[in-house]
Every structure is written in structure tokens, then in C-alpha cells.
Amino acid sequence: MNISKLLLIDSALVIAIIPVLFLLQGKKNSNLFRRSNKEELLRKTSIILPNKEKLINLEKLAKDQGSGIKFESLMGNWKFVSVWKKDRDDEDNFFSSLLRVFSANIEFKKEISTNTSPKFSVITSIQFGLLTIEFSGSGYLKGKQPLLAFFINLIELKLNSKILLRRSLIGPKAKEELFFSLIALEKNGDWLSARGQGGALVLWLKG
């Protein structure tokens, strides 16, 4: 299972309860879909994001020389902004908008480890109104580029801070690694780019 599949599962679950949220929150939800507008998001942050051509060039450099991305520079919350499917030049506007509408993000927190290689907690989540779905696990960096490898072992459905459902993943699926091949981190740490195991290019903004 790759990260795109996890996010699509999340989105399907949220879409299923959208009518309930509209009934509970009324007109407040009418503004939620405005968050899918990338131009509005960038105006607020004053950040210039790279296009796919630039990301491809940066990826070639990362494969040849390494990206220089370190463990400490990844810590924090990253919002999904754009996705480009493999072998497609144009941004996947539908999926990118869906990620922004549902406030999809990935968060890295330092994790205490007895090993020489530092590990971190990984939390991937989406949100719609008061509802949040989180996939949690652990990850680490390996290789020169490097590769960001992680696995998921817990799923939680929350209403505000209240946990409605919790499911631990055990057995082989819990040990199945997901990964991103990191490409570049903007010099001020404002954006991060990577290629997913399914071949899609992903761009995040620091949250």
C-alpha cells in the first residue's frame, strides 16, 4: 500500500460523512472548499513554488550528488500542496485540490531511539471540519539522496480531540514500508519535494 492509496481511503471516509457535517455546521462549511485554491494559499505565504521541470532537474542532482536533506530539517508539519502523476507534465489538479480541501499533511517528530540511526514519528492526516483521520507510525532516512522510509501501525478517527475509533495494525501490513525519495528542501525550509513509491511527484509547504 502506498501513501496515495492511504490518502484516497481517508478521503473516501471523509466524503461519506460530509452530509452529516453540513447538517451539524450549516453554512460554516461553505468556506472550506476555498482552501483548494492554491493561488490564494501562495498569496498568504508569499512563497514561489517550483514547477515540475525544476523538480525534475533537482531530482537528477539529488540522485547524483544527494539532496543534502538532513534528519533535523524534516521535523515539523508539512501540508500537501501539489501532486504530479508519473509521466504526466501537468499537475493533477483534482487530486491536488482534494488534498488541500481536506488539509492533508504529514508531520515528523523526533523519536527516542537506542540505535545509532535517528528515527522519527510520522503522522499523516486529513481533516474536514471537526473530523480528523490520522495514520501514525515510525520512519527513518537511508541512503545518499536520501530515502524517507516509514511504516504505519495505528489509525485513529477523531472528532476535535476526542478519539471515536482507533485501530492498531499488526502483522505483515504493519511492517510494510512506505517511502518517499526526497528531492529538495528550499533553502529557508519553506517547501519540500519528493517522489512517492508509485512514481508521483509531491510538493509540501511547511505548516
Image (spheres, grey):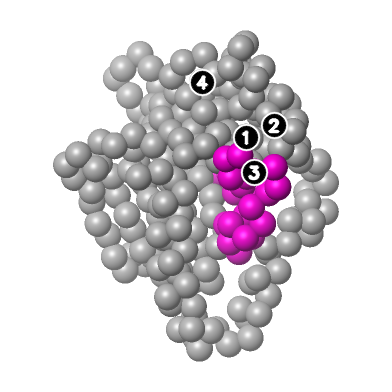
How far is the residue under mark 1 from the one under mark 4? 12 Å
Nearer-N-terminus badge (1/3): 3
Q: Nearer the viewer, mark 3 or mark 4?
A: 3
Q: Amino acid at mark 4?
A: Pro
Q: Amino acid at mark 2?
A: Leu
Density class for disc 3 (Cα within 10 Å; few <14, some 14-19, many ≥20) is few
How far is the residue under mark 3 from the one under mark 2? 13 Å
Disc ID at residue 39 = none
Residues drawn in magenta? 77-101
Q: Position of residue 70 (x, y in %)?
A: 55, 21
How far is the residue under mark 3 from the one under mark 4? 24 Å
Nearer-N-terminus badge (1/2): 2
C-beta proximity under 8 Å, tags 1 and 2: yes
Nearer-N-terminus badge (3/2): 2
The vertical placement of 207 against 66, above or below, is below
Q: Position of residue 153 (x, y in %)?
A: 28, 44
Q: Residue at x 31, y 17 (%)?
A: 115
Q: Nearer the viewer, mark 4 or mark 2?
A: 2
The vertical placement of 85 against 141, above or below, is below
Tag 4 residue: 146
User: Which secondary structure, mark 4?
Assistant: loop
Is residue 80 highlighted in magenta? yes
Tag 1 residue: 193
Density class for disc 1 (Cα within 10 Å; few <14, some 14-19, many ≥20) is many
- Residue closest to the eye, 111 or 41: 41
How far is the residue under mark 1 from the one under mark 2? 8 Å
Q: Nearer the viewer, mark 3 or mark 2?
A: 3
User: Which secondary structure, mark 2?
Assistant: helix
Tag 2 residue: 55
